[in-house]
Amino acid sequence: MPDPILAVDCGTTTSSAILVLDGKEELIEEPSGHGRTWPSAVSLDGDHLVTGTAAENRKRRHPDLYRAEFKSELAQGRQVKLGDRSFPVPRLFAALLVAMKAEAERVAGGEVNRAVLTIPASYQPYDKRRDLMIESATMAGFSAVELLPEPVAAGLAPATGAPVPVGSVLAIYDFGGGTFDCALVRVAPKGNKVLGYASLEDCGGRDIDAGLAALIQSHADAELAEHTRTPRGRLVLGDVVTQIKHQLSAAESADDDYGTTDIVVSATRGQVEEITRPLINRTLECLQGMLNAAGTSLADVTAVLMVGGVTRMPVVRATVAKALGCPLREPKSPELAVVQGAARFAAAAGTRFAAPASIRTAERPLRWEFPDDQASLTEWLVKRGDRFTANQPLARVRLLGGALWELRADDADGRVVSLHAEGGDAVFSGDWLVTAETVDARVRATPVQVHSCSHASALRGVAFRPGPKQWVAAAADTGVVAVYDVASGYNAWAAAQGSGGCAAVYSPDGEYLASGCDDGRASIWCAADGSERSVFECGTPVTGVSFSRDGKRLATASDCLHVWDTGTGTPVTLRAGTVRDVCFSPVDDLLAASYPADWTTRVFDAAPGRAATVLTEVECRAAAGFAAFSGDGTRLAAGLDDDSAGIWDSRGGQRVAIVPHAAVRDAAFHQDGITVATGGADGYARLWNIATGAELARVEHGAAVNAVAFSPDGTLLATAGGDRYSRFWQIK
């Protein structure tokens, strides 16, 4: 049975908790208040901190010993004064968590030592407030504490309507008691991801209460004015105002008694709406600013999720719906959405684990056994990078008796990756002396350069034309696209496309060639004679182009992901966010795009006739710079970090191989689906077997390799470099 977990939403004005036990979720109600939420308040009673409703009940008698809404002071490091004593904010949170934990353990009938605490999205990694929240839970007695951003939790909460499809983008509109928070969240199969966030620390239900209290005081008679001059009297008025505000969510007017007096306090919905509208306008400005900062627009937002108790007010829902023009979705309990989502996250704790990586690698350790278990290494017969054959001598050692022994390779060909001892070292039986890697005899150990073509400037793209003849196109920095016959070096045609060039790509039937340039245009050329067929105005530098499998659509990478109808020239799909490279799958409607800003490569379901949705997303450790599909569409190559490329399952997102290459800039799949070529700023192109992780061969281009491509028959590898040359290598 899994351990019980307490999910806690630590709010500014109220907090809530749900116990997750044996697959069931139970709301933990406050014993003294019997409410669904706990007031985020404390009061000092002697040496003991009382919390929640008990603290609220004491505030009128001892206002100097009472404090609420202390969450906003978490990062300031100040002590909170209660009477003549001072407490750090984490200690106040801990007192509230202690009370929640005790009630949860009563319900569970045993210890509850794990907790999930929700935090604002603004608590980014390395924010000290994260550590302080964990410190609070640790002081309360929790031994294992997880943190979950509030918008991610809200996106997991039960909501009205149909389930939100994977790939959708939700705008979270969280108008709570103390603050306003908004976030942009993508629904992903492996956990929702925050794309952007913003908040207002001085915009919440308490500000509406304060405005309504000020309005009532401005019209108060002498008796009410006299009562509200004292701290206690103002606390009583605050309670009355909150009750009236809640009633006005369902009524046009409301009133309530002022404490135990005969004074009646009243207000109308119109008055509250007049106070609330400026605050709503501020929230909408905050949300729009967040969208702008995230590089997206309302057109990309699937729905707006309304969270927080203030969103129950009709004026809030109506104003937001009119201003945004997006569908509004509501959690079944807006004020409990965050804790309900946190409970679902807690319930899935058993799915958050890491198994040993099953990434394919061809590296294998070589060890030897010696008589007397010891010897001295006299010399290596190979060096790092050398290829060797099965049973080839790799080193000599001298035994204790003085005899020389050869250390031979095992029964497989390989390449030396590293040597782990030096001449003169003492070595022992079982020592790992050599790391080798398997080699694949299907590819030449040393590919042969068969031709090269000179260009006007450094190259940024290269592509072979489908068909029996080996024609190749290259795009140069000067904006010139040139087409050559590889066998003869004959220049069939060249065309100037603008300032600067990018990757060039042929249509699947070989009839057309697409290219892009730095002046914001993408062009389609007739492959036979170089006549320009179409021009697409993308607005910003185009860094990647790709034809769909039927050639009827063209994807372009710029400040947006555009997909154009090649017949009409109109964009049929638009995605915000700077894209560095794009690649259509050769067998279906998947479209991969690399996003350097957030170090991801996303795979979209880009079927025509509907909006593109994110099917999967792979996270890199550096700015992703390229994307390439295998011939059967099942594998995706993309930049993993500055010095390696990753190979992923294109639909599931699982990484299946890593190929190390210094300053890697491009990758291409061979037709066999197993061999991958990479090009890098180190001046080399390398061939890899991704089934084993082995490096098969490498070629030295002579300058940075910016692009690589295989010929249609799989016998040639093209490299395009910063030295103004495209080179062609016989690999089979």
Image: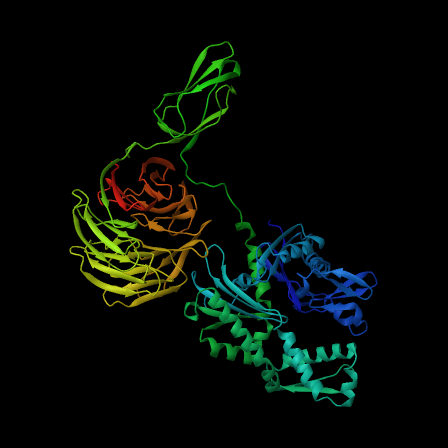
Name the spot of residue 496 as percent of width and height, x first: 23, 58
Residue sitting at x 57%, y 80%: 278
**63 left or right of 127 in image:** right
Name the spot of residue 77 as percent of width and height, x first: 70, 60
Q: Looking at this view, is 3 or 285 the one in front?
A: 285
- The vertical placement of 447 against 71, above or below, is above
- The vertical placement of 225 against 432, above or below, is below
Q: How is the image coloured?
A: rainbow
Name the spot of residue 452 as percent of width and height, x first: 23, 42
Q: Looking at this view, is 640 or 192 the one in front?
A: 640
Q: Residue furthest front?
A: 456
Task: Identify the image quadrant of residue 443.
Answer: top left
**64 left or right of 626 in image:** right
Task: Identify the image quadrant of residue 153.
Answer: bottom right
Residue sitting at x 77%, y 71%: 57
Task: Identify the image quadrant of residue 544.
Answer: bottom left
